[in-house]
Amino acid sequence: MTENEDINPKAVPVTTICLDCEAIDGWWVHLRRCALCARIGCCDSSPSKHAAAHFAETGHPVVQSFEPGEDWFWDYRRKLRFFGPKLAEPRSRPLDQPSPGPTGRVPDNWRDLTHPH
């Protein structure tokens, strides 16, 4: 662990999609990665907000963007964006995986259905 007890740089994601969205045939705008257990969830702009739900359920407060080229962290508890250590690979969704996604499930009017944050 690092000096931040809410970040485990060695935790490895088991997938590159939001499994909670997958379970309900849902879709996401962007993906976030739990910095402690590496669970992938959808962002707060997504219809189901699974990353925030993971925090509420587990108490794991820190996520990192799981979008290509982004390496910022967000602490739900402190409502603070920050930069931290490099996490284990993969550190983002694959470039051929769309955002919003997944392919075939994103409605044409997706912008009208998202949550502002």
Image: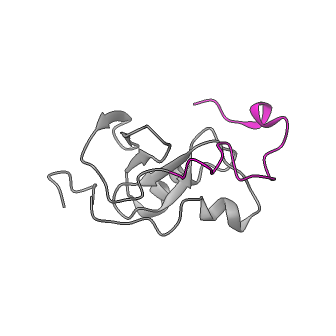
> Where residue 102 sits in the image (x, y, percent)?
71, 53
Q: Is residue 86 visible?
A: yes
Q: Is residue 53 visible?
A: no
Q: Main secondary structure of the magenta part?
A: loop
Residue at left offset 33%, top offset 38%: 78
Quadrant location of the C terminus in the rendered image:
top right
Is 40 in front, or is 55? 40
Residue at left offset 30%, top offset 35%: 82
> Where residue 59 sits in the image (x, y, percent)?
39, 58
Answer above or below: position of 51 versus 99.
Answer: below
Residue at left offset 63%, top offset 29%: 116
Colour option used? one colour
Quadrant location of the N terminus in the rendered image:
bottom left
Does 22 sit left or right of 104 as displayed? Answer: left
Residue extending farthest to the right is 108
Q: Number of labelled discs? A: 0
Answer above or below: position of 107 versus 10.
Answer: above
Is 71 in front, or is 26? 71
Residue extending farthest to the left is 3
Does 21 sit left or right of 117 as displayed? Answer: right
Answer above or below: position of 11 versus 109.
Answer: below
> Where residue 85 sits in the image (x, y, percent)?
24, 47
> Where residue 80 sits in the image (x, y, percent)?
35, 34
Answer above or below: position of 98 versus 41.
Answer: above
Residue at left offset 70%, top offset 68%: 23
Tell whether position 112 is magenta.
Answer: yes
Tell whether position 96 is magenta.
Answer: yes
Does 47 sit left or right of 70 as displayed? Answer: right
What residue span does the magenta drawing correspond to?
93-117
